[in-house]
Image (cartoon, rainbow, N blue to C red):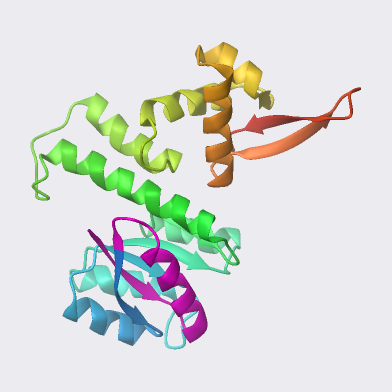
Amino acid sequence: MIDVLVVDDDFRVAEINAAYVGKVPGFRVMARAHSAAQALAALERHRVDLVLLDHFLPDETGLSLVRTMRERGHRSDVIMVTSASDVATVQAAMRHGALHYLVKPFTFAGLRAKLDSYATLRRTVDRATGSGGGPCAAQDQDQVDRIFAALRTGLPSRHSVPTAELIREVLHSADHPLSAHEVADRTGLSRSTAQRYLRLLEQSGRLSLTLRYGETGRPEHRYAWPA
């Protein structure tokens, strides 16, 4: 079970986010906090695996809170859940080690995609460390690549990280957006499999979707991996 701390200055939003978390199998909310001080107090009282963290808090910013957490030895992972969408804040969140960044407003499906991705990452790391959770022997490149792929693809459970990584590599190397048919041809996957993974990655915000209209009037979906 993955234990979660929900931090948001808006009581109603915190309740909604906590309810969303409670609907995802394998996750449970240990506490809710509405300020940085309350969040730190909750981290002292509870074992927390993951913090869903708003940036705009009444006593300090979410990123400042992350710095304080690390200074005090709290190793909980962080997913930013905030209306702050400016590039500077997003980049700072990445530098501070946020695993994902979810912009408000969002749907339950959007949050679940991030939580499923986090659960996949946890399983990948646990396999690499023998589920011990502590320091491990040096990993080979394949194991390291799997850990980074689990984080980079944002892939929910019951899906193949190598398949998503193959699609990512094809899209990343393409000089223009590709259709599901083109992705299938370049990866050797069936069109239905390529389409399913493309839709999944697009819904989780990992790639961009554009529509190209032809003579039939039905738009063709074309996908690109952000640079």
| Residue name at image x 63 percent, y 23 percent | 180
**Which of the 4 image quadrants contains residue 87?**
bottom right
- In the rendered image, is residue 53 in sight? yes
Rendering coords of residue 212 (x, y %): 81, 30
Answer with left or right where residue 10 lies relative to residue 85: left
Rendering coords of residue 171 (x, y %): 57, 26
Residue 179 position (above or below residue 128): above
Rendering coords of residue 198 (x, y %): 57, 32
| Residue name at image x 18 percent, y 79 percent | 44
Residue 58 position (above or below residue 112): below
Residue 207 position (above or below residue 111): above
Answer with left or right where residue 121 lies relative to residue 164: left
| Segment colored magenta | 1-27
| Residue name at image x 58 percent, y 28 percent | 195
Q: Quadrant of the N terminus?
A: bottom left
Rendering coords of residue 205 (x, y %): 56, 47
Magenta-colored stretch includes residue 25: yes
